[in-house]
Structure formats: structure tokens, C-alpha cells
């Protein structure tokens, strides 16, 4: 959520920066916020003036009544003023609720360093690491590789649930589990993250705090009869660990990492990546989360991105880091780097991690603050989140990049200790 004072005091600049997101409705919403906040200020001033007038009347009554003067007309005037104040306060409350609903719809401000652009085509490649594999045969897509090896079954998963679900068998299930453990070990033992096992269900307040509600309600799976939702990412429970709390500056940064399944309806994505493990309704992910001092959050974003990169480097997968442009930023993000892994079936790169600095946007919604000292005024922390990595997509990248002519798949060396020393999955 944006600071309404920031909008009031820097309206033209805020409007200009939000316009770079390329959605006219955002500009219309922030203009309406500015207009309504001005109206709110007028109402507050009217209420204050009426209260002062009523106080003067009350003082007059106290003076005149003891000396026997008729004060009934003054009391009646004070009563009418009280009714007027009540009506204005009711109007102000309704206006405040309308303002809050609007503010919840407005996305984060793009940071000044974010490249301006309209779509993913305007994203900027920051660096490319590693060389894509060269095959002396026609490489297969991962869904065919998995089927041929007997480790992935999408047809039976569809029978059990529906489309966009997967069954893993044998070494496929073990590979998924190996990746989860490998990623968690890397982030906890070497990168300074604390492992968390959070709930996989979150309430509406938690999803409002991260920016998933009310904007993206169609992307969520809600539990019937409860104010609960299946989490779309571990970012939701991790961000809300400190909701409505005040931390000490000395405790920052705090870095957490969690494995969770993730559940997404993928509303609006039908027909896109319908085959394989790329865009599923249920998938596993290892998620990093950082609570940072404001002045350190951009440094933390670089660090988080390097941690996600390290996973790809250890797995020997070619990838590139992309700075998202203003038109491609997520709702809650002020600056994002995407990691894109090479996929032979696409003859191109595919997103496998997204590392974002949300600045104080989520903290303001979730009321997560810190104090620099006992007598210091509370400030909003900065929150960052990033995939470290999306596990199913990592499985698909390994199957495609490490496939062999005989139909087998070589296990990356970094994973072999987690696969009981296995070097290859064979048909």
C-alpha cells in the first residue's frame, strides 16, 4: 500500500511513475485517491471547526447558567452542532473506507532504477551465465522424457484431480525431494537463511498484507466455509510472521527460507504452458524472504538474487538475469530480477525464479515496523521475496538439459549425494 501522504505531497510525480506501469486504470485510481483525500481533509476541518464552536458554547453555558440566565437556546444549538458533527463523521468514515479500498488496488511504485517499458519485451538482460548444451540428436521436451523414463504421469494425475497436475513416480519423486533438500541446505548452511515450515493455508488478512487480496482473488483457491486460502507461495506466510509487530533495528536483516507446496488457479493463463511442469495448479517451491532496514534493501535484493543464482550454478544450468521493466513488474514489487533458465524444448529461456524488493509496500499493508532505538519513532521495514527455486521447473530444466541420446538423464553432481550417489536415470 502506498502512503497517502506521499500521494498528497508528491501527486504529479507519483502519478507519472505509476503511469509507466502501462495501465490507465492505475492512474485513474490514484487521481481518485488524491481527490477523495482532499475531500477528507475538508471534512476533517469542518468537524474540527464545529467542535471548537461547540466547546465555546459549552464554556458560555458554564458561565451563564450559575447566574440564572436562560441557556436553553445555547444547549439546543450545541445539540444541533453535535448532530452535524455525527453526520460529518459518518460521511468521513465512509470516505475513509472508500479510500482504503482504492489504495489496496494501487500497485507499488517502480523504483527509479527500474527500466521503463511496456511488456516483457522491454526487460533488460543484466548478465548471461553458462552455455546452453549442444545435442547431436533432437532433444525431447521434459514431459516426453519423464513419460519415457516412467517418472512423470500427467494423464493419471488428470484422472485423479484434473488438468495441470502431475504424478511423480520413483526416481522422479526422489529427484523432486532431492532438489528441495539441496536448495534448503544451500540457503541455510551457506547463505545465512533460517528455515521455516509455515502453514500452507493463510487467512484473508495475510493475503491482503502481501497484496494478493483483493486484487488477485481469482488466482486463489479458497476453502469453502472458511476465511482461509491455500497459499499461492510461501511469501504469504513468511511475510506475515511479523504482521502488526514492531521489531528492533538490531534484529534486521532477518532472512528466512521455506519449502512449501503452492496452489494457484492460473486464472487468465489458459492455453499457455498447458503441457508439462511449467504452469501447474499445485507445485513445490523453495522461497526466500528477507526483512530489511530501508537503506539496505537494495543490497539485500542483490544478495537474494545471487543466492538464487548459486542454485543454478551448482546444478550446471545455463541461465540469465533479467531486470523487469515497469510494465512487467508484479503488483507488490518495486524492483524485480527474474532468473531465466535455458530450456532446449523452447530453444530459449524460461523464468525459474523471481526476486523482488517490495520496499515498504507490504509492510505498510501488514503493519510491520521497526524502531532504531527505545525512544525512536517506528518505521516500516522493507520486505523482499524470491524463489530459490521453483522446484518443478528445476526438474524440467534438468530433464531437458541433461538428457542423453539413449533416453537417459544425467544427475547433476551437486544432487548426487541427495540421490544416494545415483549418476543417471535410465529407461
Image (cartoon, rainbow, N blue to C red):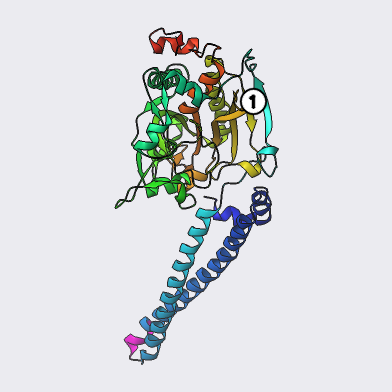
Closer to the camera in the image, 55 or 382: 382
Above or below: residue 56 compared with residue 240:
below
Residue 38 lies within the magenta run: no
Is residue 39 shown above or below 379? below
Label 1 neighbour load within 10 Å: few <14, some 14-19, many 20+: few
Where residue 270 sits in the image (x, y, percent)? 52, 44
Q: Residue 390: x, y in percent?
A: 48, 29
Boundaries of the magenta span: 63-68
Q: Is residue 263 above or below residue 343?
A: below
Residue pictured at 59% horizontal, 31% vertical: 338
What residue is shown at x 60% (from left), y 65% (from top)?
A: 35
Looking at the image, residue 202 sits to the left or right of residue 106; the answer is left
As for residue 67 lying within the magenta part, the answer is yes
Front residue (pair 411, 137): 137
The C terminus appears in which quarter of the rendering? top left
Query: Horizontal placement of 172 versus 299: left or right?
Result: left
Which secondary structure class fits the magenta region best?
helix
The residue where tag 1 is placed is 347
Counting from the top left corner in percent of width and height, residue 332 is at: 53, 44
Q: In the rendered image, is residue 320 in sight? A: yes
Q: Position of residue 363 (x, y in %)?
A: 47, 43
Side of 308 relative to 128 (left or right): left
Amino acid at each position: 500500500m502506498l502512503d497517502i501522504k506521499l500521494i498528497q505531497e508528491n501527486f504529479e510525480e507519483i502519478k507519472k511513475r505509476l503511469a509507466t506501469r502501462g495501465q490507465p486504470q492505475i492512474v485513474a485510481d490514484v487521481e481518485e485517491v488524491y481527490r477523495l483525500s482532499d475531500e477528507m481533509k475538508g471534512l476533517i476541518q469542518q468537524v474540527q471547526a464545529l467542535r471548537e464552536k461547540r466547546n465555546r458554547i459549552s464554556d458560555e453555558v458554564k458561565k451563564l447558567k450559575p447566574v440564572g440566565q436562560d441557556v436553553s437556546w445555547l444547549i439546543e444549538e450545541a445539540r444541533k452542532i453535535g448532530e452535524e458533527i455525527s453526520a460529518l463523521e459518518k460521511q468521513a468514515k465512509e470516505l475513509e473506507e472508500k479510500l482504503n479500498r482504492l489504495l489496496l488496488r494501487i500497485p507499488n511504485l517502480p523504483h527509479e532504477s527500474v527500466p521503463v517499458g511496456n511488456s516483457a519485451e522491454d526487460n533488460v538482460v543484466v548478465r548471461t551465465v553458462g552455455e546452453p548444451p549442444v545435442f547431436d540428436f533432437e532433444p525431447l521436451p521434459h514431459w516426453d522424457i519423464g513419460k519415457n523414463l516412467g517418472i512423470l504421469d500427467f494423464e493419471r494425475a488428470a484422472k485423479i484431480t484434473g488438468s495441470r497436475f502431475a504424478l511423480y513416480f520413483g526416481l522422479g519423486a526422489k529427484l523432486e525431494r532431492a532438489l528441495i533438500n539441496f536448495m534448503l541446505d544451500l540457503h541455510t548452511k551457506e547463505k545465512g537463511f533460517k528455515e521455516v515450515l509455515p502453514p500452507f493455508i493463510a487467512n484473508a488478512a495475510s493475503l491482503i498484507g502481501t497484496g494478493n487480496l483483493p486484487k488477485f482473488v481469482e488466482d486463489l483457491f479458497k476453502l469453502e466455509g472458511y476465511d482461509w486460502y491455500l497459499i499461492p507461495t510461501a511469501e504469504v506466510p513468511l511475510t506475515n510472521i511479523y504482521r502488526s509487530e514492531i521489531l528492533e533495528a538490531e534484529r534486521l536483516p532477518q532472512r528466512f527460507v521455506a519449502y512449501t507446496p503452492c496452489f494457484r488457479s492460473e486464472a487468465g493463463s489458459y492455453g499457455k504452458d498447458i503441457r508439462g511442469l511449467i504452469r501447474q495448479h499445485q507445485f513445490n517451491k523453495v522461497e526466500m524472504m528477507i526483512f530489511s532496514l530501508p537503506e539496505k534493501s537494495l543490497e539485500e535484493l542483490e544478495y537474494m538474487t545471487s543466492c538464487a543464482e548459486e542454485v543454478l550454478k551448482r546444478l550446471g544450468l545455463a541461465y540469465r538475469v533479467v531486470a523487469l521493466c515497469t510494465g512487467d513488474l508484479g503488483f507488490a514489487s518495486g524492483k524485480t530480477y527474474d532468473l531465466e533458465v535455458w530450456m532446449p524444448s523452447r530453444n530459449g529461456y524460461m523464468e525459474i525464479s523471481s526476486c523482488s524488493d517490495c520496499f515498504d509496500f507490504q509492510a505498510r499493508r501488514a503493519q510491520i515496523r521497526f524502531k532504531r532505538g527505545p525512544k525512536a519513532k517506528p518505521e516500516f521495514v522493507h520486505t523482499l521475496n524470491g524463489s530459490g527455486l521453483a522446484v518443478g521447473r528445476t526438474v524440467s530444466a534438468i530433464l531437458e538439459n541433461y538428457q542423453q541420446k539413449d533416453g537417459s538423464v544425467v544427475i547433476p553432481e551437486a544432487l548426487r549425494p541427495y540421490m544416494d550417489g545415483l549418476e543417471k536415470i535410465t529407461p
